[in-house]
Image (cartoon, rainbow, N blue to C red):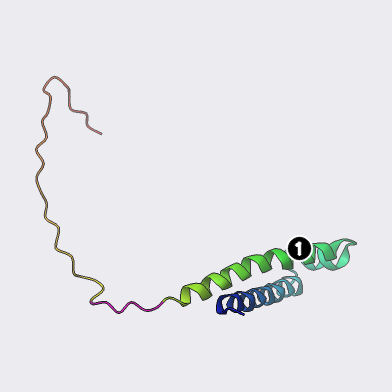
Amino acid sequence: MPHLIRLYIRNVALGFGLALAFVALLIGFDVAGLRHLVLGTEMGWLGGVMLVMFNGIVFAGVQFGVAVMRMAEPEDEGPRGGTRLPLQAVPVPVRRDPARPVRRT
């Protein structure tokens, strides 16, 4: 299996595991009355599954994005900053039409 596919599957599984732990903590600490809604109603299990799935999609995407960004090779080129020339102010002549009054704001 290609390395990138293996990386994707591993990070998606990790993201869904984190989502499951997150939803378990939400229900365990009864945030906004979720414990009653999920465990005490007839279709509450569907809400719990949706919480896990949607948080899993978000967490898996973030986890994979972080993993891909960490794959970048370090830049080994010279100095990183302070190499620009200092800016110099250049006067720009502006003509004023004497027929138009000057507005002060």
- Residue 44, magenta (yes or no): no
Q: Which residues are magenta?
A: 73-78
Q: Residue 40: give x, y in percent of width and height.
A: 87, 66
From this view, report whether residue 9 is shown above or below residue 99: below
Looking at the rendered structure, the secondary structure element under dot 1 is helix
Q: Residues within 10 Å of mark 1 (few under 14, many from 20)?
A: few
Q: Main secondary structure of the magenta part?
A: loop
Q: Residue 3: give x, y in percent of width and height.
A: 56, 79
In the figure, residue 94 lies in which quadrant?
top left
Task: Say which of 69 and 46 sits in front.
Answer: 69
Q: Residue 13: give x, y in percent of width and height.
A: 67, 76
- Residue 74, magenta (yes or no): yes
Task: Say which of 7 and 84 sits in front.
Answer: 7
Q: Residue at x 57, y 73 (%)?
A: 63
Q: Residue at x 76, y 75 (%)?
A: 28
User: Which residue is under mark 1?
Assistant: 50
Q: Residue 32: give x, y in percent of width and height.
A: 73, 63
From this view, report whether residue 92 is shown above or below residue 97: below
From this view, report whether residue 6 is shown above or below residue 82: below
Amino acid type of the residue that numbered disc 1 sits on in the rendered structure = Met
